[in-house]
Image (spheres, rainbow, N blue to C red):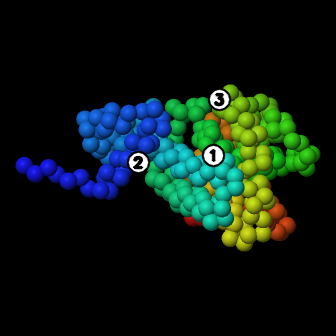
Amino acid sequence: MAEKKIDENILQQLTKLEEKYEAMGQDLSSYLDGLLYSDYLTYWDYIHLDTLLSLQNPRTAIPDEKIFILYHQVTELYFRMILNEMEQATYSDPVGEKTFLKRLRRINRYLDHLIDSFDVMTEGMDQDQFLAFRMALLPASGFQSAQYRKIEIHSTDYIHLINLDKREELENEKDISKLYEFLYWKAGATELATGKKTLTLRQFEAKYGKEFIEMGENLMNCNLLRKYHNHYEGNEEVIAELKKLDQKANVDWPLQHLKSATRYLQRDPDVIKASGGTNWQKYLPPRRQRIIFYPELWTEEETREWGQKFKKALTSTHA
């Protein structure tokens, strides 16, 4: 039987692999033995499909609770995709203009998917079912999404995430731990009558507070706003993408939440409290928070009218 001739390209690849493993003090032959005996990779093993489909564990027997869980899991995966792009854009210094734009466009595309997907929440669950299972979730709340807060911290300077009534007072403050105490979203889980933090907020801060402060310190000079000023200032394409990001993250996305909350939690004449005790009527409307990642890219009139279209969103919800 004639000996099979090995393709020259394979021999070249083997030589390169041998050089690679020799540089690490490893024996290529051992790795080839492992490859010889290993099983072929399957799709379901690669993405851990069985594990993924086992991660929905409803607290009740109400069917639509599974939809609620699945939707939030999908949302968190999109957040992870956004953060993957943001981490590469911020911690790599500098990235080229084309690469930076590519990352911004990917981020905006993911946000578009998230915004469009919110119909699952507004139309994909029966209201009576939602109101029946929601109380079994206490004190958990979508408010406790740490990844979304990380997206905000990657996007801009900490001062732009501060309560509106504190921004001018703290505009020269550089201590992130001090600014952290006045992050705008905290007011959304603080009892209006007493000023006390809800359990939802206390849990959230206990788990992630230190991480949020450290992240703010690490990104102080390299968040997306700093990247713009340091490397791409005046670039019209970059400006356009940053403004899209601002609009999507700080107007369109919270408006979708507002529409959903209005649909499920507001039934005339009563307003039903959110599961985590969050003040959703004050916390969600963009016009109240005026969170703007890139205020210098907008006109004074645009910043003054930030989020004003919320009335239209509410009207369409009741239509």
Image vertical order of residue 132 relative to residue 167, above or below: above
> In the image, what residue type sits under mark 2?
Lys
x then y, percent, for residue 268 = 62, 51
Tag nearer the camera, 1 or 2: 2
Q: Could you tell me if the residues under marks 1 and 2 are in contact, i.e. CB atoms within 8 Å?
A: no
SS class, disc 1? helix
> In the image, what residue type sits under mark 3?
Lys
Which quadrant would residue 182 be assigned to in this image? top right
Tag nearer the camera, 2 or 3: 2
Image vertical order of residue 146 relative to residue 93, above or below: above
For this view, does 304 lie left or right of residue 10? right
Q: Which residue position holds label 1?
A: 148
Task: Say few, some or many: other residues with alpha carbon within 10 Å of mark 2 (under 14 / 14 to 19 / 20 or more).
Answer: few
Question: What number is the disc on residue 207?
Answer: 3
SS class, disc 2? helix
Q: Could you tell me if the residues under marks 1 and 3 are in contact, i.e. CB atoms within 8 Å?
A: no
Residue shown at 29% from the left, 44% from the top: 42
Q: Quadrant of the C terminus?
A: bottom right
* Along the viewing direction, whichever of 115 and 239 lies nearer the viewer: 239
Question: What number is the disc on residue 79?
Answer: none
Q: Earlier in the sequence, mark 1 or mark 2?
A: 2
Whether residue 318 is visible to the viewer of this picture, yes or no, is: no
Task: Say few, some or many: other residues with alpha carbon within 10 Å of mark 1 (under 14 / 14 to 19 / 20 or more).
Answer: some
Q: Earlier in the sequence, mark 1 or mark 3?
A: 1
Measured Cα–Cα span from mark 1 to mark 3: 15 Å
Residue shown at 73% from the left, 35% from the top: 214
> In the image, what residue type sits under mark 1?
Tyr
For this view, does 304 lie left or right of residue 222? right
x then y, percent, for residue 159 = 82, 47
Q: Which residue position holds label 2?
A: 16
* Along the viewing direction, whichever of 76 and 41 lies nearer the viewer: 41
* Along the viewing direction, whichever of 290 and 21 lies nearer the viewer: 21
